[in-house]
Image: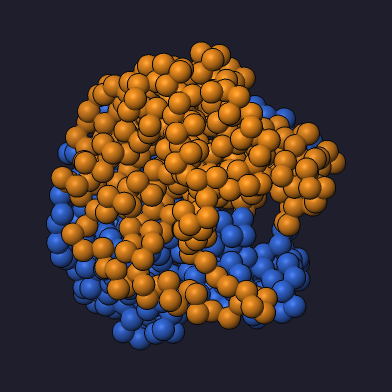
Chain colours: A blue, B orange
């Protein structure tokens, strides 16, 4: 790993996207999101994912010239069609629209169908919180996790994001429904390490911390066993019911993950009770640590710390992937 | 356990509540919810909880004559004050208001402060789905679970409910953030059984399936370790930011669980894409079972099966607690 300036990362991505017939605005936005994901320490959806994104464009699975379109409006729920455009662009537009609805009406919802992978869900949580809104968003995905009681992957990891604005640093939960992502399990496998807690089942149906076994049989563990399984299923159902878009069922049938469904809800109150929220954080953090010297973090805290460090010292990049991306220029 | 008719259960509860100066309407509603919780198999928040509820009224923690009041209105988010009234009554009124807002505007939200335990959260999910709405609701609670990295309980189990209407039986997720409730752990302890999966930490900080150890040290496990811990914290923060009500911090400081905060969101589209939802359920259920003869359920499916059986054969009750309740008449 080495560190490079944020601007260099973003400009490199932008340069490549412009060559792929992105507009200036769209290239800047998408490049900024990839660079920010690396800056915030989410390498799997930053630099490391960029070559895959480029390949999806070249394969015609992501249409760089598509714009999201309003399909129907039902009070303060709007349904948009992403027209298979760039996922992070569509998601940003959708969250922006939900922010506008909530700013005018307290609450608003955008259901987005026919879009693509949004990379890091937290991006849109930070966006909502930066605009002073509570942001809730979730997406479906290709099947990668069995339902509780099943042995084959039929559920997406369907990340859920909940963000609350806060002067001293937003609270941003960004949580997939599997205990570990396949990307994270691969990291452990490459280091020849076991997972810190069980992450799935082995072929005999026993819980295992062996990342290779789980990557091979795709029996990833939902968080909280039956609970995460149910939550992943229900989020997919809500997405499908609201947007009329493709469910995990349909996405999985096509083998390649594209044309997913997403939902963006914003809420805003004139007074968001900052002092009461600070009291919650202080109380939670005051608790005795489980390990001597341990500390308790709120969701988003480590992201912000990584961001501040990256802004000072440059963004950490995997040198091999960085060289690979430079070849795309 | 023996079975008694639903009506007898409800009438008995109602009779007792009328003696505690509940109005006719409020007694009928609360009695119906307690009876329905037992009917649906959620005994911990049905008959088994009724004597505790009566004691809370006698102790002055639940005010039977309080009515919820609109405090402020911000577009389609309304803030209501529960005035420390009966929790299931306030929650029903709040969800009804969210249903009305969503029926008129696609989406609506009621933030409720200063209310009391709603018993089974799923009750209000079924209510929303019966009205044709997607219902999302959550509550905070007294601390009973450490935050990730901590050794003392500072988080509530903060149940989250998500319900989707469906002709053949609603989909209703009702999920607390701890792997097991303390009530459930007590059931295992009384049967001298271990938990089926780890439910918390022992005093040495190791994961354990021993319900007695966890009940003693209050180190219950959040679902998905750090993930459920973060989700429980964020739900409490959202509740506090939206309602200005009491957080888990404040509830816990008072030692007794009362004056909690809740949120009710409804969404409704003209077309909720029933056929696509059926396709998801069929696909999920078609997966190969992990155990021979096993089956995969959607959230709400087992509840509905229990309900149908109770309606045919009568509601299962713990005879000892039933006798105890009859003494209250």
Q: Residue at x 42, y 38 (%)?
A: B32
Nearer-the-camera pick, B182 or A139 = B182
- Left or right: residue B206 versus residue A274 is right
Number of on-image labels:
0
Q: Is residue B147 above or below residue A310?
A: above
Task: Kindly tell me whether residue A3 is visible in this rendering.
Answer: no
Q: Residue at x 43, y 76 (%)?
A: B282
Q: Residue at x 55, y 58 (%)?
A: A228
- What is the x, y in percent for residue A51? 45, 76
- Left or right: residue B22 versus residue B103 is right
- Left or right: residue A184 versus residue A274 is right
Q: Residue furthest right?
A: B204
Q: Is residue B15 above or below residue A114?
A: above
Q: Residue at x 85, y 41 (%)?
A: B204
Nearer-the-camera pick, B292 or B9 = B9
Q: Is residue A194 above or below residue A102?
A: below
Q: Is residue B156 above or below residue A243?
A: above
């Amino acid at each position: 790993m080495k560190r490079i300036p944020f601007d260099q990362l973003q400009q490199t991505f932008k340069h490549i996207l412009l060559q792929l017939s992105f507009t200036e605005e769209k290239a800047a936005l998408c490049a900024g999101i990839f660079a920010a994901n690396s800056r915030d320490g989410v390498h799997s959806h930053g630099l490391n994912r960029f070559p895959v994104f480029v390949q999806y464009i070249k394969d015609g699975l992501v249409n760089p010239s598509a714009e999201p379109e309003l399909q129907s409006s039902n009070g303060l729920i709007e349904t948009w069609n992403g027209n298979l455009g760039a996922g992070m662009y569509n998601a940003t537009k959708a969250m922006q629209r939900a922010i506008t609805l909530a700013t005018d009406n307290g609450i608003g919802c955008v259901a987005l169908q026919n879009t693509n992978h949004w990379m890091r869900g937290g991006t849109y949580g930070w966006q909502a919180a930066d605009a002073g809104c509570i942001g809730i968003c979730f997406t479906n995905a290709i099947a990668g996790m069995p339902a509780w009681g099943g042995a084959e992957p039929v559920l997406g990891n369907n990340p859920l994001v909940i963000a609350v604005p806060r002067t001293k640093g937003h609270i941003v939960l960004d949580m997939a429904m599997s205990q570990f992502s396949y990307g994270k399990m691969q990291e452990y496998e490459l280091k020849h390490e076991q997972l810190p807690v069980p992450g799935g089942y082995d072929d005999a149906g026993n819980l295992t911390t062996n990342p290779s076994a789980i990557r091979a049989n795709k029996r990833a563990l939902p968080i909280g066993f039956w609970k995460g399984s149910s939550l992943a299923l229900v989020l997919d159902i809500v997405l499908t019911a609201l947007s009329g878009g493709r469910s995990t069922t349909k996405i999985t049938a096509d083998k390649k993950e594209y044309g997913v469904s997403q939902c963006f809800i914003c809420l805003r109150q004139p007074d968001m009770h900052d002092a009461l929220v600070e009291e919650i954080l202080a109380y939670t953090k005051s608790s005795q640590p489980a390990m001597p010297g341990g500390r308790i973090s709120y969701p988003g805290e480590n992201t912000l710390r990584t961001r501040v460090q990256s802004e000072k010292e440059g963004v950490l990049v995997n040198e091999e992937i960085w060289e690979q991306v430079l070849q795309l220029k």
